[in-house]
Image (cartoon, helix red, strand yellow):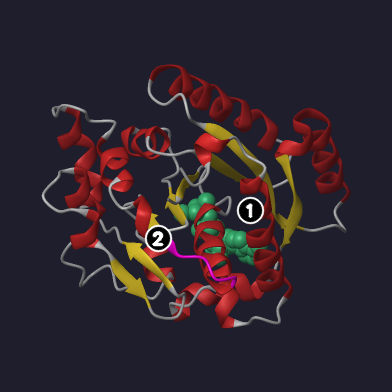
Amino acid sequence: MGSIFCVANQKGGVGKTTTTVNLAAGLAKVGKRVLLVDLDPQGNATMGSGVDKRTLETTVYDVLLESATVVEARTHSPQGGYDVVGANRELAGAEVELVQLERRDKRLRTALHAVRADYDFVLVDCPPSLSLLTLNGLAGAHGVVVPMQCEYFALEGLSDLVNTIKQVHANLNPDLLIIGILRVMFDARITLQQQVSEQLKAHFGDKVFDTVIPRNVRLAEAPSYGVPGVVFDPASKGAQAFVEFAREMVERLDRMPARARAA
Ligand code: ADP
Ligand code: MG
């Protein structure tokens, strides 16, 4: 039975999609069965996995509105080596439609739990907000992976996310844990980044992943080819860091409470 993880941070452009796509490809590379779920109407994780969002007939929108199951909606990333439930602009409307529906925040949870046996990892790429879509992601997950850039305001934003996670934990999903904080787009030459990184470790301790993802142009180039960076240029520093991160996730999962592991 696979574990379900959300990649979340309410800020845009902090590396959520890059993390989700490359963690998925990294886990596939080390032999894990992976499903990536794109929960952002921008559909960047879908396109970055080599799946054309414009021609998709069934997406996560249909799964949320329960007009399709995950089995019906999933497709395969040929280059990434993992399955994808894609998203496109249609998903932006789901927010409004869901508000009126029952179990509006638990629909993804129900859908994903039905396919857990098919995967070792299910990774959900969240939109840059703490919206009903993100809530669906958090309500259905065992844990949250938080990518962050080591910049001055990053710590401030983190406390909003931590509060939301606490609320979801208390009201919707007692299983939810913060798995870890991933430092991304890191540049060790910048003193401020090192300082924020140290503050992070002082404050969050071993919740901060050991792996650090460097700023690497190959990771930024890969999406335009519809190939995860890990596959696009396996020798690049960014690709190697994400494979290392995939290994760290596997190890961290082994040390997590049983409820988050193969059950
Ligand atoms: P989010 O999903 O949080 O909005 P993205 O993953 O789309 O963030 O990243 C924002 C931008 O930064 C994208 O253009 C992406 O290619 C680039 N980027 C992300 N991570 C890295 C990295 N480690 N090195 C270089 N560019 C990166
Ligand atoms: Mg994104």
User: What secondary structure is the stretch in magenta mostly built from?
Assistant: loop
Residue 237 image offset from top left, x and y in percent: 74, 73
Nearer to the camera, 196 or 175: 175
Q: Label 1, on which residue?
A: 249
Q: Distance between the residues labelled 2 and 1?
A: 15 Å
Magenta segment: 30-35
Residue 223 image offset from top left, x and y in percent: 48, 73
Quadrant housing residue 35: bottom left
Callout 1 amino acid:
Met
Neighbor class of circle 2 (other Cα within 10 Å; few <14, some 14-19, many 20+) is many
Residue 208 image offset from top left, x and y in percent: 73, 41
Residue in view at x 20 percent, y 72 percent: 55
Callout 2 amino acid:
Leu
Task: Reply above or below: 99 against 5.
Answer: above
Helix, strand or loop under label 2: strand
Residue 35: mark in rendering:
2
Task: Reply above or below: 223 against 198.
Answer: below
Residue in view at x 16 percent, y 26 percent: 102
